[in-house]
Amino acid sequence: MNSAKSFTRRFFLRAACATIALALCMVTQPASAQTLPATAAVNPKKPALFLIGDSTIRNGSLDNGATAGQFGWGHMLHYYFDTSRIYVVNDAMGGTSSRSFQTSPNLWPLVLQKMQPGDFIIMAFGHNDSSASIRGNGDETQPFTGRGATPGAVMHSFGWYMRQYIEQARDKGATPIVCSLIPRNRWNAGKVNRNTNDYSLWAKQAADQDKALYFPLNDMIADKYDKLGMEEVQAKLFPPNEAVHPNWAGAKVNAETVVEGIKALKDCPLKDYLLADPKCPDTPDIKSPARGEMGPTALAPVERPTNAPASAPALIPQ
């Protein structure tokens, strides 16, 4: 009996000591370790940030500058995130519209297949939508007669396709974030042309209708272009005679602006994965093939590792 009482006292004494030690350990941890998001601290599988869109996000098959030194902003976005805690998966594909990315069996369906609860997705389309989707955010349809059309194919509005991305990503437990397309290198009276009354507007309308997060990337970049002026933008941020696709410096400006847009979002845990002091190179991190050299065929979305260790590198196609 006395032995049992002695054992009980020793058990509770050890438990109390362990509790005190654990508390002291937590107090002495650095602040950064105490403020990690709960999902990052307890989920053994890292969340992923997926990027979908066109060549302004991933230029060419590998986004390696093969096309006259052009780059998409998705190429360097991983430099702004703590990739030990979140993957940055650039699944954008050059030449795609809001419709073609969704209807291609090798694009959106494969992205959805990889998506898990707790993931994020940023989407931006519009540069290739002039004849691929109906202008606006309505629910009307019409026959699709464009490239790759099949008998009986229909075309929906740009906003309708954006809403499908939002709803399907949300059904997978991911957080959808819509942003407007980047402005083109086209100017009028010293001001860069904006998409205020077309694809930027319809992207926002689709996001608002489905209560998704949105930031006005088109206006944010255009404000920077206007401040720099046409001559400096064309000389420093775009290859010669290029109207759509920035060079490395221009893509870096766009990536930085995407980060600013993320930071401005309300109630968006994605910002918790941003680095406080990111280091994105000022020059390309990849050697471009010789101009005119044919690159590999277009890639399907990259694979997402399963059971990846916490220290796995960012998943960026190079």
Image: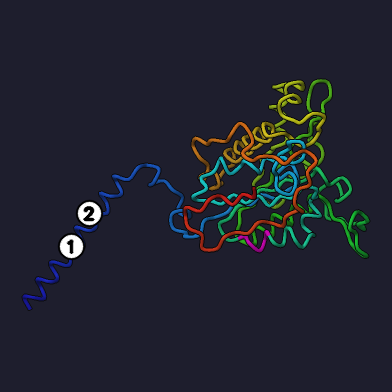
Residue at 14%, 70% in the rendered image = 8
Q: Camera-side residue: 160 or 109?
A: 109
- Choose the circle earlier in sequence order: 1 or 2: 1
The kind of secondary structure element at disc 2 is helix
Return the x and y of residue 253 as percentages of the image width and height: 65, 32
Q: Looking at the image, is 263 positioned above or below residue 308? A: above
> Which picture quadrant has residue 204?
top right
Q: For the stretch drawn in magenta, what is the main secondary structure?
A: helix
The kind of secondary structure element at disc 1 is helix
Residue under numbered circle 2: 20
Instruction: Give the residue type that dot 1 points to.
Output: Arg
Instruction: Say the numbered circle drawn on residue 14.
Output: 1
Return the x and y of residue 82 as percentages of the image width and height: 51, 45
Instruction: Say the numbered circle drawn on residue 42.
Output: none
Q: Camera-side residue: 290 or 43?
A: 290
Q: Which residues are magenta?
A: 111-115
Return the x and y of residue 50 as percentages of the image width and height: 63, 52
Return the x and y of residue 71 as percentages of the image width and height: 71, 39
Instruction: Give the residue type that dot 2 points to.
Output: Ile
Residue that protrudes farthest toward the bottom in the picture:
1
Q: Residues within 10 Å of mark 1 (few under 14, many from 20)?
A: few
Q: Is residue 206 visible?
A: no
Q: Looking at the figure, which quarter contains the N terminus? A: bottom left
Residue at 72%, 55% in the rendered image = 299
